[in-house]
Image (cartoon, rainbow, N blue to C red):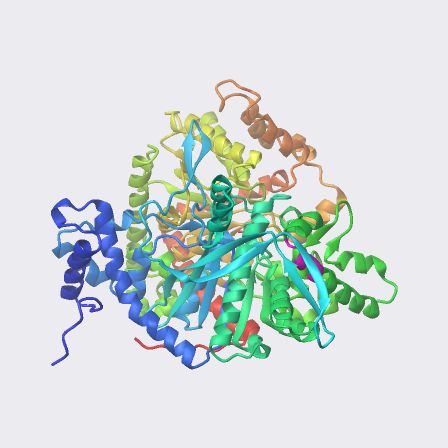
Amino acid sequence: AATPEHTRTGMSKASLKQAYIDNLFYIQGRFREVATPHDLYMAAAFTVRDRMLDRWVKSAQVYKTSHARTVCYLSAEYLLGPHLANNLVNLGISEVARRAGEELDLDFEAILEEEEEPGLGNGGLGRLAACYMDSLATVQIPAIGYGIRYEFGIFDQDIQNGWQVERSDTWLRNGNPWEIPRPKISFPVRYGGHTEHSRDQAGRSRVRWVADMVVSGVAFDTPVLGYGVGNVNLLRLWKAEAPESFDFQVFNVGDYYGAVHAKIEAETISKVLYPNDEPEAGKELRLKQQYFFVSCSIQDMIRLHLNTVGPLETFHEKFVAQLNDTHPAIAVAELMRLLMDDHAMPWDAAWDITRNTFCYTNHTLLPEALETWSVALFERLLPRHLEIIYEINRRFLDTVRVRYLGDEARVARMSLIDETGGRRIRMAHLAVVGSRAVNGVAALHSELIKTTILKDFYEMSPERFHNVTNGVTPRRFIVVSNPRLAELITEFCGHDRWIRDLDCLRDLEEHAEDPALQARWREVKTAAKQDLALWLSQHGGVVLDPQTMMFDIQAKRMHEYKRQHLNVLHIIRVYQRLKQNPNLGMVPRAFIFGGKAAPGYYMAKLMIKLINSVAEVINNDPQVNGFIRVAFMADFNVKNGQRLYPAADLSEQISLAGKEASGTGNMKFSMNGALTVGTLDGANIEIRDEVGAENFFLFGMTAEEVRRKQAEGYRPWDYYHGDDELRSDIDLVTSGLFSHGDTNLFRPLADHLINQDPFMVLADYRAYLNCQDRISEVYDRPAEWDRMSILNVARMGKFSSDRSIRDYAERIWGIEPKPIGI
Ligand code: 26M
């Protein structure tokens, strides 16, 4: 007979039930009768966490004793989303846990709802880091994710009177059962002061950095479990605290108030995530945050290496560090500093190790989003790093001069220091020069990097430039968020097989025309639409009809380049058509939006107000509201995204070609059976290549056409005057109809379109409308639509983040899986 299960780790229903009751009592101190919903959630979370810990310990042991090469993912953001449902899926106990819950008379859905998601990121870049952590564990690559444990993540969004109102995110208020504090794993991080140069006995130059502020970074660890494997990786987030000795020192001098103030200043560093998805000039605290988590992480890596195999000369053989954009690029100078100043390594040896450790992923071409820091700020905050950056630059520019004799213009373009205007450090250049490999996040984006922002660097060393197209995890974005679809897919693609190998979705292809599958496919979609409609009616009050209406969804950060206003112009056109011809036989549509605006981004906030104002008019106009409705889902985050993706018929991916580096929402929608209306931008291009041009609604200019039109001199004014419908749609925005008579409210938006239109909304307007008309025609032929939808899902294998991670592992990191059994 089998040995009895341990109730703390056993996976049977009986063990789960006993463990749950025990945790409720011994951790929350509650009986069922008096437990709050939060107690019930905590007991569930601890029951699941217990089942991850023995795998975690085993992984750590195997990784350590086998000296496994390890990836360190350095990212200022991790947009994780709720843990509980995801960990249940990855442990393979969703079903048995659900049944255990039923027998305990628990409301399983209510328990999942109770979790407060860690929103430690803004959007795509942060969510990508989270998907990659899931896939690293699933494809069994030893990995540590390093980042910041923000006390306040991305703000919660309310909509009041149509405007975005920000509320602070207090995700830690009720405790976080998924993290384990490691007070003994902590490192000092210093700021400010000056440097002192001297020579040691051997005559080698040594530098001492005398800082004037020190904080302590404390590790908080979250286990990241792979799907159906024993591998558990580590997400290590740093919290800033005042060093232990600190307040005493000042206290002894009698300055109690000063001591408390210094403590607060230290703790401020990991207090709050910057809610912008592009840099703001001169934000000193942001630079402090970046250096804070980078310094802790590199010190931790050095400690781990010296604890196991050492010596430092082989650091780059033990670790590869991936820079998630330039936010952690200061790591290049920090590793140099630690190797030279703390470990007495000569420059050349240190540079060799540094350059072989880092790889850099670029996520944007938008000039305003490229990070630069003023030399003056750097000098004040990180004087030693500035010296090191100058020396890296001096040596690098010498190689440029030797290679391109006399080309001083090129030297100036490639310099790590931008000397035009106030002197600034170009973080992308630091990242490129300090890295072994550079990659973009979709094929088009990686090509554009080579011809635009990093052209000179590409010419000098083309072999270092790569593409790794982004991906998303099918565990969270299909299995967790769309269980009905997952169940249907499983019937055709083998139990569990497709979840770890998404290419298996191809098995659906041969059934795409099968009316029986189509009918069930449609049922699954309609059920998801019903769930969303119910939720929306309870949160915001808009009533949508899931039976008759096409759900047309655009959910992403609010940004002019993403062109939510193009979508709005289409809605206004349909509205005007309906008003002119109330008997117009048209496919009913629900236009659904979601997305946060950076709090300081005026145009983005005005777009939210416009969407809500258009919604108010249309939803209250009985002449049209049987055909069209508009809904804005407040607080689009991971949890709410999981309600949207399964319910979409149509996915809006309408950025101006050349602006969206990749996009990942496009993949999440398509994996859930939405068809895409999209431009040839980012990963849209590859999605279209995979699903087939006939199964994708393409419109708009190519990146090349955009470039040419910009070069010729783009005049939006000509489009405005050359197209009566366009003019009438824009004029309706400023007519006062959507603003209770106020003709000024939306004027900035309309004027900007007519006069500047930097993202060429007007140039793509007509093509977009025509495309939308085609879409409505196809939607009217359900068999055709369903076939296209099935084929979209069947051909999405490439966009699993497992594929992305394998690409990184093979082509960039040179790292092998280290399988750990269950
Ligand atoms: C930088 C400095 C100071 C404050 C904030 C930032 C900052 C934060 C987030 C800058 C950019 C940030 O995110 C950019 C982002 O999310 N980019 C998206 O990355 C995705 C993953 O690769 C792509 O799919 C998207 O196309 C790209 O826009």
Indicate left or right for 421 with 19 as reference: right
Magenta segment range? Answer: 382-388
Q: Is residue 278 visible?
A: no
Nearer the observer, 327 or 586: 327
Indicate the quadrant where residue 194 lies: bottom right
Q: Residue at x 75, y 41 (%)?
A: 713
Nearer the observer, 666 or 557: 557
Residue 607: percent from left, percent from top = 52, 34
Residue 424: percent from left, percent from top = 71, 50
Q: Can residue 385 be found in the magenta stretch?
A: yes
Residue 766: percent from left, percent from top = 59, 40
Q: Is residue 40 above or below residue 739?
A: below
Name the dominant secondary structure of the magenta segment: helix
Q: Which residue is farthest front?
A: 253
Count of picture labels: 0
Q: Is residue 699 visible?
A: yes
